[in-house]
Image (cartoon, grey):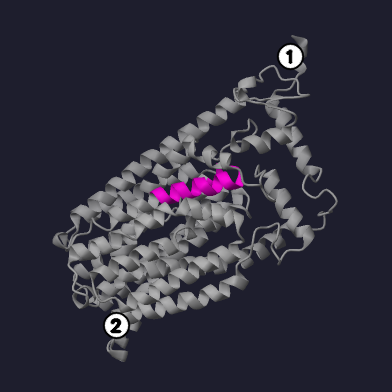
Amino acid sequence: MEVLEKTPPLISQVTTFASEAVTNSQYRPDIDTSHVDERKLLRRIDLHLLPWLSVLYLLSFLDRGSIGNAKLYSLEQDISVTDNQYLIGLTVFFFPYAIFEPASNVVLRSIKPSTWLSGMMFCWGIVMTFHGFIRNYAGLLVLRILLGIAEAGLYPGVVFYLSSWYRRSELGFRVAIFFSAATVAGAFSGLLAAAIANMDGIGGKPGWAWIFILEGLATTVAAFISFWVVQDFPETAKFLTEEERVFVIRQLHNDMQFSAGGEPFKTRYLWDSLSDWKTWVASEHAMNRSDGPLYAFSLFTPSIINQLGFEATEANLLSVPVYVWGCLVTCFIGFLGDRIGSRSWINLKQWIGLVAYIILVVSRTPALSYFAVYLAVRSVGNPASAWVSSNTEGAYKRSVTLGMAVGFGNINGAVATNIYRADDRPWYRLGHGVVLAYIAIGFFFSAFFSVLLRRENARRERGDRDEVVEGVDNKRANERNGIYKNIEEARRAKGDKWSGFRYTC
């Protein structure tokens, strides 16, 4: 009995040994990093990564959503499509977009980000340019499908890429900055569409065609620049010194990212993701919490404002301040989530989005509805991907889990494109009601995900998940949890299932 009292539990032993392993320079032990200034390094990483990645997402969201702006300038009439055909054209984008996201993330881990992300961008820029030459319904469908394939993987790929650079307490704000490019794109698209529409008739093409052509060409040019601007993973990034590279990877190891610095591909990592309950709960959470409301909001905000009594150009311009406010809200929420260390608390504050859509459902006053749109930004201003990423360890497992979660969420874009029907204007009660249901379900899954994570952390504190580690005397260790030669082998083999790993709630 005396021996038992003096024997520390495995949790404390695991934490001690794991900490010592990292402190003793587990990654590149021959390199001294004591002189590296962490704050200056973090700022330099931010400057090299965030601005250009945000530009990529801005262009991506601008390109996929510009069809909503083009619609206001007689797109449907010029290519002879009905409102239902137009909605189908929006819908078909999301199926290939969602399906190819997990595979894209696996390729991204295997290929340099500078090559994969830039190549992806070049392809969708070309497809976007050809949107300006659409002549009929068949052309619309083909190009929207190709655009979905070409853009697949950008968002989950960049989130995964950022998670390979930042610790969990740093990731939320950075993802929010990147995600806020979607709201900036909403504001910018309104201004840009209003300006480009003045080219109506130039070269014998309508204003809506020039929206597609100019935006597509801009994306193609940016793709060439990306080959030199986009950085690769920390272990090969050229803007870091060798000491800084090692410092970043050791910091990630300290943050329980044991795969940082490289991980060989194994097919079991894919199965680890698909068989993990977090993948499926997170997918439901992302589907209902973020993506459904986001796509409904971005694709139809100009039309909603237009149907409240404003002309096309006025509607596009009035959407600008809405998106600017959304950008500020998104960044603030990401910053707050990192500061308080609780993603669930932030997610449960989405009741503001519930209030916004209740107002939109019952309102019959344009001014009140326009005010509610500002509140509705709260429902799309909190990307769930940072929470998912923070609770998944293993580079390939995290890449697949993020691809699955975001991919499932993007399927909701197919639903969102069909709920704002022309027959329901000007108040769009059906569309607002469906988004309200999305937010309510997302509220439930936020709470459910948090409860399950806290319960699992409690099991690990009790020692229910303790592994058998050779040389460690632990009475609570169970062979069912695995038998390992040392702590290092256990944490690398099990990732976030390791008994010493703690989930971020």
Q: State which mark lies toward you, 2 or 1.
A: 2
Number of numbered tags placed on the structure image: 2
Name above or below for residue 28 compared with residue 428.
above
Q: Which residues are magenta?
A: 389-408
Q: State whether residue 295 appears in this view.
A: yes
Magenta part mainly helix, strand or loop? helix
Q: Which residue is mark 2?
A: 207
The answer to whether the residues at label 2 and label 1 have Cβ atoms under 8 Å apart is no
Residue at 27% from the left image edge and 84% from the top image edge: 206
Instruction: Give amino acid for label 2.
Output: Gly
Magenta run includes residue 259: no
Residue at 66% from the left image edge and 47% from the top image edge: 263
First in sequence: mark 2 or mark 1? 1
Name above or below for residue 69 compared with residue 466.
below
Q: Secondary structure at mark 1?
A: helix
Q: Residues within 10 Å of mark 2 (few under 14, many from 20)?
A: many
Magenta run includes residue 395: yes
Q: State whether residue 505 appears in this view.
A: no
